[in-house]
Amino acid sequence: MSGEATPRAQVDPGALERAFGDRARCNACGVEVERYRVIALFLHDLAAVRAYCGGCYEAACDGVYHARGDGMLIDYHGFASRFGAPGPPPPPASRVDRMLGALLRDARLRRLAPPSEALARRARCIPYRFASEWLIGDRKSDAELVLRPDGAVERLAGDPAACAAVRAALGLPG
Ligand SMILES: [Zn+2]
């Protein structure tokens, strides 16, 4: 192999662990802590970087995305220039990951499980089932979205406010 082989992952863990400065608010429990951990979730070309306290970190690693604290959404190139390349540039996002990315971009989303097609595949359940929690006004609201691998919506069920939020984020007809 020449020296021009596929670049290896070169994330600087130190830079990532300080992504939010000296203190950060945990995305799962909402408490602000000094010693926080950071999880970067990749949906092809979109990275969701989120802080967690020590107590919530393990659960968050298990494939549940929380958005109650400090976090940022950046594209692959933004991530690579700030934290180091996580691997070779990714292929264009799948339909399902583009849809999940649209949910992550909605500031009202509080929780998504699983948060990526790769993690949904691990559950070995087709069609994929995504549980989401939303904060609409000051009220929590849940919806379950069931997607086929081609991105077709098989089912959307739950609280009307949460279902409306999912439809709006995905541009689905009401
Ligand atoms: Zn926590």
Image (cartoon, rainbow, N blue to C red):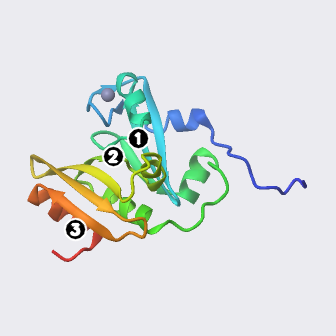
Query: Nearest the camera: 40 or 24?
Result: 40
In the picture, the disc for residue 111 is none
Asked whether mark 2 and ligand 1 are closer than 8 Å, the reply comes as: no
Residue pointed to by mark 3: 167
Tags 2 and 1 in contact by the CB under 8 Å rule?
yes
Q: Indicate the amino acid at tag 2.
A: Ala
Q: Secondary structure at mark 3?
A: helix
108 to 15, vertically: above or below: below
Give the spatial CA distance, label 2 vs label 1: 6 Å
Is there any visible trace of residue 103 in the rendered image?
A: yes
Residue pointed to by mark 2: 113
Q: Indicate the amino acid at tag 1.
A: Gly
Residue depicted at x 63% and y 38%? 12
32 to 131, vertically: above or below: above
Q: Residues within 10 Å of mark 2 (few under 14, many from 20)?
A: some
Q: Residue 125 at what x, y percent from top left?
A: 39, 52
Query: Nearest the camera: 143 or 37?
Result: 143
Q: Residue 72 at what x, y percent from top left?
A: 40, 49
In the picture, the disc for residue 63 is 1
Q: Residue 67 at what x, y percent from top left?
A: 30, 44
**Residue furthest toward the bottom?**
173
